[in-house]
Amino acid sequence: MGQNRSIRVSLIGLVSDPNREIRTRIGFESGTDPVNFTGVRNAAQRKLFDELGIPAEALPVDRFTPLGRMLYKAPSDGKWGEHELDYLLFVVADVKLLPNPDEVADVRYVNREQLKELLEKADAGEEGVKLSPWFRLVVDNFLLKWWDCVESGTLPE
């Protein structure tokens, strides 16, 4: 999990997944393989390096499990907002993080209990914890189910 930097245009300072803003703007990333999500996987790998300093060799694209897409829309501050189709990829890895301070204000690994505590703090408005709307949608609709699947070895390939 990461916290967005204050230099962003939208969703400033909110806790989110650190690789949420993938743009497939480089030619080899823009493939439209609807089964293997090749372009999306390449973009995710690139953004994990850009934001968290995770080198490509630490997370080969074939380790990313595509789990679907989600149409997402959220206002931000009355001037900016987001409306996009996001791809949902899952990867489990033990990697060293070297966060880019221009992209990420804070980052931490959490277990399931720590995530639940963070959600409770956000819901109660405690300790200034705020979640991005996108991250909250993923947590509420998918993440805990995926976590169960990872632990039981049943995450779809």
Image: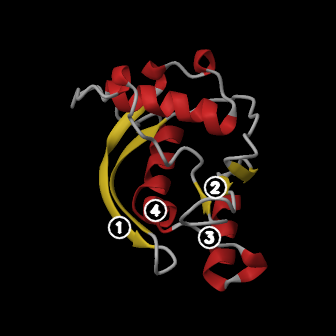
Q: Residue furthest top?
A: 57
Q: Quadrant of residue 97?
A: top right
CA–CA distance between discs 4 and 3?
14 Å
Indicate the position of residue 147 as horizontal and vertical percent values.
51, 47
Look at label 1 and name its amino acid. Answer: Lys
Look at label 3 and name its amino acid. Answer: Leu
CA–CA distance between discs 2 and 3?
11 Å
Look at label 4 and name its amino acid. Answer: Trp
| Horizontal arrangement in the rendering, residue 144 relative to residue 82 (left or right) | right
Is disc 4 placed on a helix, strand or loop? helix
Query: Residue 112: which numbered mark, if any?
Result: 2
CA–CA distance between discs 2 and 1?
26 Å
Is disc 3 placed on a helix, strand or loop? helix
Q: Earlier in the sequence, mark 4 or mark 3?
A: 3
Indicate the position of residue 90 as horizontal and vertical percent values.
46, 38
Residue at 68% across / 51% down in the picture?
Answer: 111
Q: Earlier in the sequence, mark 2 or mark 3?
A: 2
| Horizontal arrangement in the rendering, residue 116 relative to residue 19 (left or right) | right
| Horizontal arrangement in the rendering, residue 85 relative to residue 112 (left or right) | left
**What residue is pinned by disc 4?**
134
Indicate the position of residue 23 as horizontal and vertical percent values.
42, 40
Q: Do the numbered discs 2 and 3 sit on residues whose CB atoms are within 8 Å? A: no
CA–CA distance between discs 3 and 1?
21 Å
**What residue is pinned by disc 3?**
119
Q: Earlier in the sequence, mark 2 or mark 1?
A: 1
**What residue is pinned by disc 1?**
73
Frontmost of labels 3 and 1 is 1
Q: Earlier in the sequence, mark 2 or mark 4?
A: 2
